[in-house]
Image (cartoon, rainbow, N blue to C red):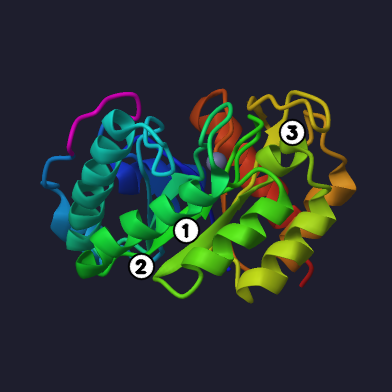
Amino acid sequence: MNIGSHIPSKKAIEEIDYRKGNTFQIFISSPMMWKSPKPREDVDILQEYKGNIYVHAPYLLNLASPNNKVRHPSRKLLKETCKVAATFGAKGVVVHGGSVGEGGDIGKGYENWGKALKEVEDTGMRVLVENTAGGKNSIARYMDSIERLWEVIGHLNVGLCLDTCHTWAGGIPTKDAVKGFKKLVKKIDLVHFNDSKDGFESSRDRHENLGKGNIPKEDLEYVINNAKTDLIVETPNGPDAQKKDIAWIKRRLKK
Ligand SMILES: [Zn+2]
């Protein structure tokens, strides 16, 4: 089990060392743009890094979308992201579950996820579906939908990323989320370990530093000691605040 954070991708190793983490997550292209990632100039340095490296795909991706004009570029960008992530041995590429929108056929959304995963199979990269906080027709907000998604895609090279802010704001009690995810996939691939600025089932996705938000400390402590996987904080307020968050987790680890 490693502990780290989402960091700027430029001088990644320096960034994570400063925060005293031993695993990290980066974007390899702009998170708000439909732009393919470039090959990494620091590929050797990243390959030599001892901890796990995770890549977060751009937020714009919606692999479930019924709209061709969103779904097709999403697949293309996922493929490009997986290819570059594979060059430096990333452990996985994290993608939000997405949604089929108002009135959309959610069953179709699961199938679209399956098609997208088959298209990136040859990159060898594992894709991690992250649960999301909002929306009514979301693929990965509530447990029952995540379970149904898994019936369609669970046999492929895919895992789950549990975001504690999203489970909370999305309306899955924290302990239920850990138990439910584990039941579904045996090993959770990754936890995004964030506090939440908002209330339970608020549908709002606003991360907060650990212990400063609305998620009960007891819930966060439960995740630290029961998720049994790498924890990455995606918390605000810069490097020093993230360094504190990483220390916050380490203090609560049961020996
Ligand atoms: Zn997240």
Residue 217, horizontal then vertical, whole percent: 86, 44
Quarter location, residue 52: bottom left
The answer to whether residue 2 of the structure is visible from this angle is no
Q: Which mark is residue 50?
A: 2
Specify the amino acid type for callout 1.
Answer: Asn
Q: Which mark is residue 22?
A: 1
Quarter location, residue 73: top left
162 over 201 or under it: above or below: below
Ligand 1 shown in quarter: top right
Residue at 31% x, 61% y: name it: 90
Label 3: which residue?
169
- Position of 144 compared to 150: left or right? right
Q: Nearer the viewer, residue 206 or 119?
A: 119
Looking at the image, tell me whether mark 1 or mark 2 is earlier in sequence order. Answer: 1
Residue 38, horizontal then vertical, whole percent: 12, 40
Mark 1 lies within 8 Å of ligand 1 (Cβ measured): no
Instruction: Find the distance from the CA under tag 3 to the CA under tag 1.
Output: 28 Å
Whether label 1 touches label 2, CB < 8 Å: yes
Residue 134, horizontal then vertical, whole percent: 65, 30
Which residues lie in the magenta part? 30-36
> Which of pointers 3 and 1 indicates the residue nearer the eye?
3
- Position of 66 compared to 105: left or right? left
Residue at 56% x, 45% y: name it: 106
Q: Quadrant of the N terminus?
A: bottom right
Residue at 66% x, 52% y: name it: 145
Residue at 18% x, 53% y: name it: 84
Looking at the rendered structure, the secondary structure element under dot 3 is helix
Instruction: Find the distance from the CA under tag 3 to the CA under tag 2.
Output: 34 Å
Specify the amino acid type for callout 2.
Answer: Lys
Task: Say how many tags the image has.
Answer: 3
